[in-house]
Image (spheres, grey):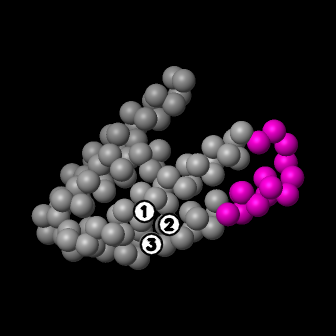
Amino acid sequence: MHAQIEEEIFYPALRAVIKDTDLLAEAEVEHASAKDLIAQIRAMDEPGEMFDAKVTVLGEYIDHHVKEERNEIFPKARSARKLDLVAMREQLMQRREELMGETAEA
Ligand SMILES: [Fe+2]
């Protein structure tokens, strides 16, 4: 859900107003890697060394991703004058609610 709302709303809006978008591309790759690892963990039948390794690596990916968002992407968003972060916050929360509803129905 984190990845989906960022990729649908936050990253495209930021991409439109900043020049250096490498970080956003990297963040999308990180989202994809985390999703892939989550799918692998979900598909595993029993715990074991590989299960533990995947969970550990997923934690490391997420730590890295959160740090990069906090330290590099969010400051860029805050300093981009053309971006209305208050309005975007509403949009993100609304989309999150929608997705949570869909997950609950599934
Ligand atoms: Fe993210």
Residues at discs 2 and 3 in contact (Cβ within 8 Å): yes
Cα distance, mark 3 to mark 1? Answer: 8 Å
* Disc 1 secondary structure class: helix
Residue 29 x %, y %: 46, 59
Determine crowd level at label 3: few under 14, some 14-19, many 20+ residues with C-alpha closer than 10 A: some
Instruction: Name the residue at 77% across, 42% down.
Output: 44
Tell me the quarter of the picture where residue 76 sits: bottom left
Residue 91 at x, y percent in the picture: 27, 45
Q: Is residue 34 magenta?
A: no
> Which mark identifies residue 27?
1
Answer yes or no: is residue 74 visible. Answer: no
Is 23 located above or below residue 7 in the figure? below
Mark 1: which amino acid? Ala
Which amino acid type is marked by label 2? Answer: His
If you read the primary sequence from the N terminus, does the residue marked by circle 2 or circle 1 appear first? 1
Q: CA distance from mark 2 to mark 3?
A: 5 Å
Q: Which residue is mark 3?
A: 68
The residue lying at 78 percent from left, 53 percent from top is: 51
**Which range of residues does the magenta coloring cover?**
44-57
Task: Report x, y in % for residue 33.
Answer: 55, 56
Are discs 2 and 1 less than 8 Å apart at CB? yes
Query: Does label 1 point to a residue whose CB lies under 8 Å from ligand 1?
Result: yes
The residue closer to the viewer here, 5 or 29, is 29
